[in-house]
Image: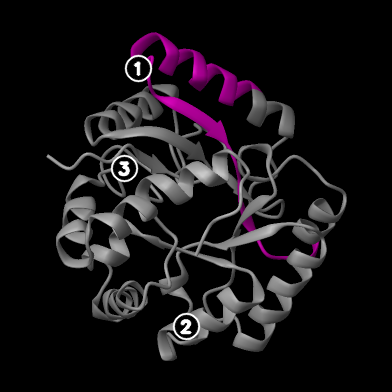
Amino acid sequence: MINIKICDIHCHLLFGVDDGAKTMEQAGNMLEIAYEEGIRNIIITPHYNSRIWPVDESEIKRKYNELVRFARDYYPNLNIFLGREIYYCSDAMDALRDEQPITMAGGQYVLMEFDISIRYEQLTQAIMEIIQFGYIPIIAHVERYECIMKDYSRAFQLKELGAYIQVNVSGVMGHYGKGEKKCVKMLLKNRLVEFVATDAHRDDKRTPHIKKCVEYITKKYGMDYARRLFEINPSLVIENKNIEE
């Protein structure tokens, strides 16, 4: 048994606010799966995209508190924190500029999503803009972006700018094709990834299963790196501390 206290920094457990869990019951089922998989800390990250999911922040907070109470009753050593998956657009940049509460666990880190066909020049400009606002960007599921799939070394350049890299369990395990899996393999091989997360959306598909991925990465890339990906780096985000390279 692998002794890693897993932290999932990207999942859509908050019910009825985006394309993730639809009901509290489904969210509860997802929490059960996550707990059985060894996850003990979760940053739930409902989409922040006002054009598609115009959800009031008070509703986000209310449902988050309800989920925390549920977890406290059934899984007392499972900690849940609030974040957002922020889709890069002018509205999101305005929200960050205005210091709205859409960061990861209330700290300086922000989980950023981009259009999959974004040009690399646009991506670097966006990262620099976010950093200028005083935030630390984590690029969500980087394996999906065409500009990175074409040249994985660009991930190194993004890290040089000050961004961190997150890949999905599905990308590691090849659930969405050889292209994403090959990209993730090269990123992991060159130690360009800081986080592996579930990006879970449901209890029947795109679930919060992660244990096999932890075992795979531990076997292929070593326990030290696996612990950084699944426990140490995510914990530093929660604590709002700098990640050591």
Question: Which is more N-terminal, label 1 or label 2?
Answer: 1
Q: Residue, x 72% and y 34% (percent of image)?
A: 57
Q: Where is residue 167 in the image (x, y as percent from the top left)?
A: 40, 63
Q: What stretch is highlighted in magenta?
A: 62-90
- Is residue 103 depicted above or below 217 in this figure? above
User: Tag 3: residue type?
Assistant: Pro
User: Tag 1: residue type?
Assistant: Tyr
**Of helix, strand and loop, which one carries label 3?**
loop
Q: Position of residue 152 (x, y in %)?
A: 42, 85
Q: Is residue 176 visible?
A: yes
As drawn, the label of residue 208 is: 3
Q: Is residue 100 left or right of residue 145?
A: right
Instruction: For the residues labelled 2 and 1, say whether their Cβ atoms are less than 8 Å apart.
Output: no
Q: Residue, x 74% and y 65% (percent of image)?
A: 130
Q: Residue, x 80% and y 43% (percent of image)?
A: 100
Q: Distance between the residues labelled 2 and 1?
A: 38 Å
User: Tag 2: residue type?
Assistant: Ile
Residue farthest toward the top in the current orientation of the protein: 73
Q: Which of 85 and 54 is in front in this view?
A: 85
Q: Residue, x 58% and y 72% (percent of image)?
A: 115
**Of helix, strand and loop, which one carries label 1?**
loop
Q: Which of 13 and 106 is in front in this view?
A: 106
Question: Which is more N-terminal, label 1 or label 3?
Answer: 1
- Residue bearing the label numbered 2: 148
Tell which tag, 3 or 1, sits nearer the viewer.
Answer: 1
- Residue bearing the label numbered 1: 75
Q: Position of residue 205 (x, y in %)?
A: 27, 47
Q: Where is residue 54 in the image (x, y as percent from the top left)?
A: 70, 44
- Is residue 124 depicted above or below 91 in this figure? below
